[in-house]
Structure formats: C-alpha cells, structure tokens
Image (cartoon, rainbow, N blue to C red):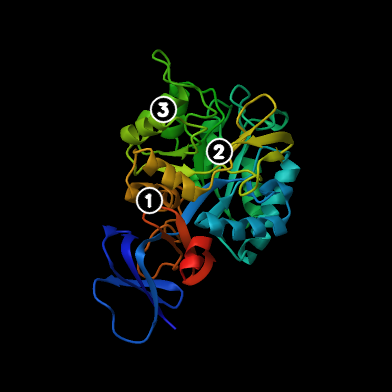
C-alpha cells in the first residue's frame, strides 16, 4: 500500500517547507502537497517532527568493529545495517593505503557483492590512496605509497565492476596530471589528500580535473601568507568541493565556519572518516595496520595523531547547527545532496524528489534522529520514538 507522511517540516530538493503531506508510491517519493491527498494509503503521522533525505557518507572506513579493509563482506553488511542508526542511507565504502594485491581483493569483493547489503546502499567505492606523500601521511601506511599509475586504476575499476566513484592522491606525485585526466575521463572523481603540495601544484591538479579536497585542513599543507598551500587552494579554487569532519576534534568550529563562508555551504561536504570504533565504546582498536586508542570521542595513534574518527553523520549535522555556523537546511544538504553531487551519484540519492528512492530520515526539532526509512520502509527507530508510540 502507498503511504503518506504528515510532518511539521520537510526538507525537499526545492528547499525547506512547513507542514504538509508527502506521498510515497510503493518504494519511491511522490508529490508533496499542503492538503491531505485523496485515495487509500497508510498515514505516517510525524506531526511534531521533521522529514529530511537520507544522509550520504562519501568517506567512511568502518563501523561496529568492522573495517572495509578486512575484506570480509559480512562486515560490510554489518556496516551497512549499522549506518541506518546514523541516519545514513547511502555510502561509499572507503579503503586505506595498502598493497596492490590487498586493494585488488577488497574492490573485487565489494564489486561482486555490493547489491547484497540490507541497510544503507553502497553507491560506489572511494579509494583513499595509495598515491600519497609522507609529510602529511596521517594514519596511512607509507610502506605502500607510490606514484599514481593508470594501469592500477584500470585494474581496480575492472575488478570492482565499475564501482569506483572517487580516488584520492597527492598532487605533487609524479604523473598526477595525466592520471587525473584519465580518471576524470572515465567518470571517476579525483580528490586531493595527504599532501604537502604547494598552491600551484594543487591548482595544476584542479586545472586537470581534480574536484574534491579530502578532509579539508587535515592531512595537507597549511595556509601560509607566503605559500597558500593545499588549504589556500581548497579555500579559493573554483569548481571544487571540500570535505569537512565536524566532530569538534579535527577542525575548530571557527575554521569550519571560515571554510563554509569562503566556499559557500553548497560546496562543503560533511563526512565522517569513521573507522571501526564507530558506534562502539572507548577502547583499543586498529586502523589498517596501526593500533588506535579511542578516548572521549577521538581516535588517535600512539603518537597522538588523529586516526579517522568515530563521528556519526547525524551528529555532524547537529554539531554545525549547534555551533551556529549553519542552518538546519544547510547542514542537512551538506550531508545529503551535496555529497551525492560531489561524487556523481545525485541521480541515485540525497534529495526528496518525485520518483527517487524513498530513503529518508525523521528528525526531532533539536535534530536528534528518530527514524530511518529505506525504500519507504521503516528500518530504524530510536528508543525515544518507540516510547512515544
């Protein structure tokens, strides 16, 4: 049976609107109207809540003790289901720098089985590395760093069945310009990351087609008044998107606001960069081959460097609103429509528009997640909402 959602506020592709009714025709969104539609349907009454599109995480390594690099699809299925409690309905499983052989196996596994997940939809793969440089290595393993090779990307795309949507590299590596041109000609978005590049090197990469800066401010050469570096490029170059980890650990709220103000909130992509400790208690974990200690919301290597995050995307939305640097509409778009646009999957997810898959979330007025729907079916409900039912 078709459904109709009644809610206090809707975040549609056309903008935010007040109370009304949104139809769901089988598993897809129908029309929005201010008046109760005629006909037979199931009414979903969220009279005091807000309806937003399902969130899209384009940079996530793991969750619930599982990591993409484990090469265990049962673990990726667990990540997919666990993401529903984070408000995420679409994601890009994200790799780490590793051996070519290991990456071969991981992308092949995801490519063969990605349609088998029961939770958040796998909309592609993000290869974070291995074409980085050492100075801003973060939690990437330098033993596997190399110059970008088109032949490797060709093989990974073939093994994945065409699922690679984004790949990150350091633009100062030899052969980057040719690699970027090739990747973008095949519809793969090229992101810049873990790099000590000069402003001019970053600009050259963007001129050749790179279009995303990975976890902006983190893992890149900083802004200096004589050498703007990667951060200066991220702030000023036209036609690019900027990822941002808004957990209060990676980037100060003022720095986040500066990026949003300079770039506009239509060019900022909220991500988590979440590792296997996501949705888990503090304690000892691993990221790739490195031991990580999670304490008070931060995941760190033994040397104190941040090692991914334990952020949930729903909390990134709430954080930027609570910090006073984005409106609810802006925050929601930075975690749904804009991520989808940045990696070329806007036709599959990220907005509430007629005929799109009915993937949406229910939020309280304080932006707490109350429920997650996938293809029009309730798949997650908060304890608070259950108590009110």
Residue 311 located left or right of residue 2: right
Say what secondary structure mark 2 lies in: strand
Q: Is residue 286 left or right of residue 374?
A: right
Q: Nearer the viewer, residue 44 or 132?
A: 44
Q: Residues within 10 Å of mark 2 (few under 14, many from 20)?
A: many
Asked if marks 3 and 1 touch (Cβ < 8 Å), the reply is no
Q: Which mark is residue 164?
A: none
Q: Residue at x 47, y 50 (%)?
A: 314
What residue would you read off at disc 3?
A: 233
* Front disc: 2 or 1: 1
Marked residue nearer the N-terminal end (3 or 2):
2
Q: Quadrant of residue 219?
A: top right
Residue that numbered label 2 is attached to:
168
Q: Callout 1 environment at 10 Å: few (<14), some (14 to 19), or many (20+)?
A: many
- Residue sitting at the far front: 387
In this rendering, the answer to whether 171 lies above or below 7 is above
Real-space Cα distance between discs 3 and 2? Answer: 16 Å
Q: Secondary structure at mark 3?
A: helix
The answer to which quarter of the image holds residue 99 is top right
Task: Kindly identify which residue carries mark 1.
Answer: 333
């Amino acid at each position: 049976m078709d459904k109709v959602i009644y809610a206090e506020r809707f975040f549609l592709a056309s903008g935010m609107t007040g109370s009304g009714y949104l139809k769901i025709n089988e598993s897809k969104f129908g029309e929005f109207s201010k008046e109760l539609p005629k006909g037979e349907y199931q009414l979903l009454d969220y009279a005091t809540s807000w309806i937003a599109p399902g969130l899209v995480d384009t940079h996530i390594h793991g969750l619930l003790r599982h990591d993409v690099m484990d090469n265990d699809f049962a673990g990726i299925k667990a990540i997919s289901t666990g993401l529903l409690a984070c408000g995420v309905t679409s994601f890009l499983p994200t790799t780490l720098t590793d051996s070519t052989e290991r990456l071969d196996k991981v992308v092949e596994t995801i490519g063969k089985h990605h349609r088998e997940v029961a939770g958040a939809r796998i909309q592609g793969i993000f290869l974070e590395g291995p074409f980085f440089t050492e100075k801003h290595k973060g939690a990437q393993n330098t033993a596997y760093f190399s110059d970008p090779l088109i032949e490797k990307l060709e093989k990974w795309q073939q093994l994945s069945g065409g699922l690679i949507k984004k790949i990150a590299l350091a633009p100062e590596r030899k052969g980057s310009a040719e690699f970027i041109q090739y990747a973008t000609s095949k519809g793969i978005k090229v992101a810049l990351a873990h790099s000590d590049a000069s402003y001019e090197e970053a600009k050259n990469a963007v001129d050749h087609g790179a279009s995303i800066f990975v976890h902006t401010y983190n893992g890149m050469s900083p802004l200096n008044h004589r050498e703007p570096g990667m951060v200066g490029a991220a702030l000023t170059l036209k036609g690019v998107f900027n990822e941002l980890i808004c957990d209060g650990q990676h980037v100060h709220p003022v720095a986040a606001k500066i990026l949003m103000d300079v770039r506009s909130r239509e060019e900022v992509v909220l991500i988590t960069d979440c590792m296997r400790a996501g949705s888990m208690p503090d304690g000892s974990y691993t990221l790739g081959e490195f031991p990580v200690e999670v304490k008070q919301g931060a995941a760190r290597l033994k040397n104190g460097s941040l090692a991914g995050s334990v952020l949930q995307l729903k909390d990134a939305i709430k954080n930027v609103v609570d910090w006073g640097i984005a409106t609810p509409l802006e925050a929601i778009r930075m975690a749904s429509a804009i991520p989808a646009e940045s990696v070329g999957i806007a036709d599959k997810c990220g907005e509430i528009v007629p005929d799109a898959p009915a993937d949406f979330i229910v939020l309280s007025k304080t932006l707490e997640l109350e429920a997650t729907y996938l293809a029009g079916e309730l798949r997650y409900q908060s304890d608070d909402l259950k108590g009110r039912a």
